[in-house]
Image: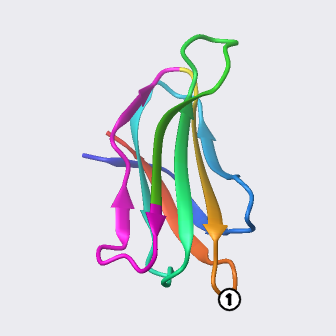
Amino acid sequence: MPILEASGTLTADGTEQTLTTLTTNKTFLLSVDTGNMVNGETIEVSIYTKCLTGGISRLAYFVSYSHVQGTPQKFSVPVPSDIEFKATLTQTAYVTAYKTFPWKVLSL
């Protein structure tokens, strides 16, 4: 049964913004609601992890979505992490204004 680890709403600003950073030993799943997107808009969702304590955060998962999404609720692949899990969102293109994106991270 999934456990809610973190959640919130992010208003994009054109930069890579951190949704959350978690440091427990679990397998995580990121969910982002893209229902506010319109044609001409693009977002990038990234997840970073560390291999070793004191190491560098490295990209472990990346996906990009553009335009209106027929299925707006998006899920990452499960990402195991025992040191650091960091999720980010970047809105790289917008039509009239940056959008707000609800999100949450579940552990499995």
Q: Secondary structure at mark 1?
A: loop
Furthest residue to the bottom? 96
Residue at 55% across, 56% down: 44
Circle 1 residues within 10 Å: few <14, some 14–19, many ≥20: few
* Magenta residues (range): 65-82
Which one is in front, 6 or 51? 51
Residue at the location (74% across, 58% down)?
15
Quarter-of-image position of residue 96? bottom right
Mark 1: amino acid: Thr
Give the x, y percent position of residue 79: 39, 34
Return the residue nearer the eye: 90 or 95.
Answer: 95
Residue at 36% in and 73% down:
72
Residue that sits furthest to the left in the current view = 1
Q: Position of residue 39 (x, y in %)?
A: 48, 83
The residue at the point 31 percent across, 47 percent down is: 2
Is 42 included in the stretch rendered in magenta? no
Q: Is residue 13 above or below residue 46?
A: below
Residue at numbered disc 1: 96
Can residue 74 be found in the magenta stretch?
yes
Q: How is the image coloured?
A: rainbow
Percent of width and height locating residue 97: 70, 84
Count all numbered tags in the image, as a single digit. Answer: 1
Locate residue 93: give its quadrant.
Answer: bottom right
In-image side of 100 versus 104 (left or right) = right
15 vs 70: above or below: above
Vertical side of 10 occupied by 75: above or below: above
Residue 33 is left or right of residue 2, and the answer is right
- Against 10, residue 41 (above or below) is below
The quarter of the image holding the C terminus is top left
